[in-house]
Amino acid sequence: MSLMKLAMAVACVAATVTASAQVQQQPPPTATTKVEGTDNVYIFRYQGHQSMFVVTPEGVIATDPISERRPVKAYIDAIQAVTKAPIKYVIYSHSHLDHIAGGKAFKDLGATFIAQKNAKARIEEVKPADVVVPDEVFDDRKVISLGGTTLELIYVGKNHSDNMLVMRLPRERIIFTVDWIPLQAVQFRGMADTYVPDIEEGLKKVIAMDWDRIIPGHPGPGGRQIGTREEAINQLDYLQDLSAAVKKAVSEGKSYADAEKEIKLPKYESWGGYGPFLPMNIERYYDYWNRGI
Ligand SMILES: [Zn+2]
């Protein structure tokens, strides 16, 4: 066999192995990723959810426990694989249980739980056993300083819940905020617990803030874990386009069913959830324009 033929044969076998590996490959259930260009910012992914944690010499600032109906140990182990420093804080992005369940194990390690004040009332209403009620709440703004890292907790008003935080690392120019600024996706299902049109005002406030990268609560297409300012700008464009189209349909006397069938927003066709969720997003805005709710 000539060298060329041998090289081709090897390449061919390699390609076959790669192809079969791709077919069989499932992403592992959990993964820890250090955010490129930072010294101490990590993303912990647990199946389809993700949280940010920040490691400092004086301790760890963790966010959402993301352990509804699954062992929270995976998240704690992921942190302790990076540092033995104590977990000082757990900060809730917002009150939705799929993001905040599982905090008890963090509490047992001595963490202080912080949330926006409206989250506390909601959590107390629906609280399952493994959800920790926040120890500290605040209204508009709070700054956490720990081991040389500053994390701002900012409330920009109602959007996806009445208690969503934007967590901003000013030095790293990164924000972490969950569910309402997805990566290349329409809003989830019927936009439950989402305030319209307040969410659009919130997006304008986030766009006006100083940051470069966003860590959302779920990976996007292809497993992408981090977005750019474009995500917020595009999401605002989407909601404004959706709102205008639904407003027009309502003003023309269209029914829910006709609005949901006829409105197409081809610019966003490639986004996650476009097929199943666009009609549900339309219904949410239909209620707003038709009834003011
Ligand atoms: Zn949510």
Image (cartoon, rainbow, N blue to C red):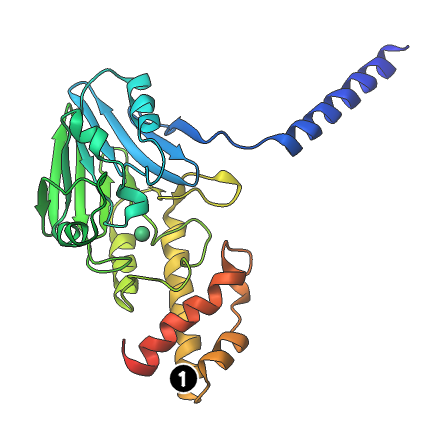
* Left or right, residue 253 beside residue 14: left
Identify which residue is drawn at 75% across, 26% down.
Answer: 16
Q: Name the quadrant containing residue 5.
A: top right
Residue lying at 13% horizontally and 54% vertically, measured from the top left: 121
Residue under the image location 23 percent in, 49 percent down: 95
* Image coords of residue 67 (percent x, y): 32, 37
Q: In front: 130, or 51?
A: 130
Question: Is residue 130 positioned above or below 141 on the image?
Answer: above
Residue 239's spot in the image, x, y percent? 38, 65
Q: Is residue 149 visible?
A: no
Q: Quadrant of residue 86?
A: top left
Task: Mark yes or no: residue 240 visible.
Answer: yes
15 vs 120, left or right, is: right
Residue located beneath label 1 in the image: 250
Q: Nearer the viewer, residue 155 or 3?
A: 155
Indicate the position of residue 52 as horizontal and vertical percent values: 30, 35
